[in-house]
Image (spheres, rainbow, N blue to C red):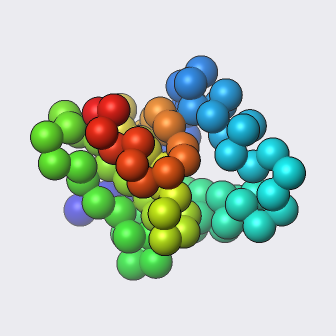
Amino acid sequence: MLPLRVKLEYSRHFLSERKKYVKNSLQRLKSYKKEVTIFVSDPNHPSLNIEKLRNAKGVYTIRLSKGDRIFFIWKEENTAIFIDIGKHDKYRRF
């Protein structure tokens, strides 16, 4: 079972990719903020569609839209590190 309240940390790569992801797109920014807010307060919420990637050691995804994801790892029971954001196909990196 996942913790009830999550602390977030961000990799440098994630911060760079997030800036590109939300640039010039109010809809993407709103979607990102909404899903992160839900994740921090209730990581078990079904709308997040959290999935563990197969063949990727401890990498999970949060669905932002049909084709976009936040990629993260659990650092501790209540701390997640966001490592990437963007197209679903990025899972191949991991």
Q: What x and y, as percent, mark residue 43?
A: 43, 63
Instruction: Please indicate whether residue 58 sits to the left or right of residue 50 in the image.
Output: left
Q: Is residue 70 above or below residue 48?
A: above
Q: Nearer the viewer, residue 87 or 63?
A: 87
Q: What x and y, as percent, mark residue 9?
A: 54, 33
Residue displayed at 24% across by 53% down: 52
Quadrant of res 50: bottom left
Q: Is residue 92 above or below residue 33?
A: above
Residue displayed at 83% across by 62% down: 26
Instruction: Please indicate whether residue 19 sits to the left or right of residue 12 in the image.
Output: right
- Residue farthest to the bottom? 46
Quadrant of res 3: bottom left
Residue displayed at 39% across by 78% down: 46
Residue 93 visible (yes or no) = yes
Q: What x and y, as percent, mark residue 51?
A: 29, 60
Residue 6 visible (yes or no) = no
Q: Nearer the viewer, residue 85 or 49?
A: 85
Residue displayed at 38% across by 70% down: 49
Q: Quadrant of the C terminus?
A: top left
Q: Nearer the viewer, residue 45 or 14?
A: 14
- Residue farthest to the left? 55
Q: Is residue 23 above or below residue 33?
A: above
Quadrant of res 32: bottom right
Q: Nearer the viewer, residue 81 or 14?
A: 14
Q: What x and y, as percent, mark residue 24?
A: 86, 51
Instruction: Please indicate whether residue 93 sits to the left or right of residue 32 in the image.
Output: left
Q: Is residue 87 above or below residue 55?
A: below
Count the marks: 0
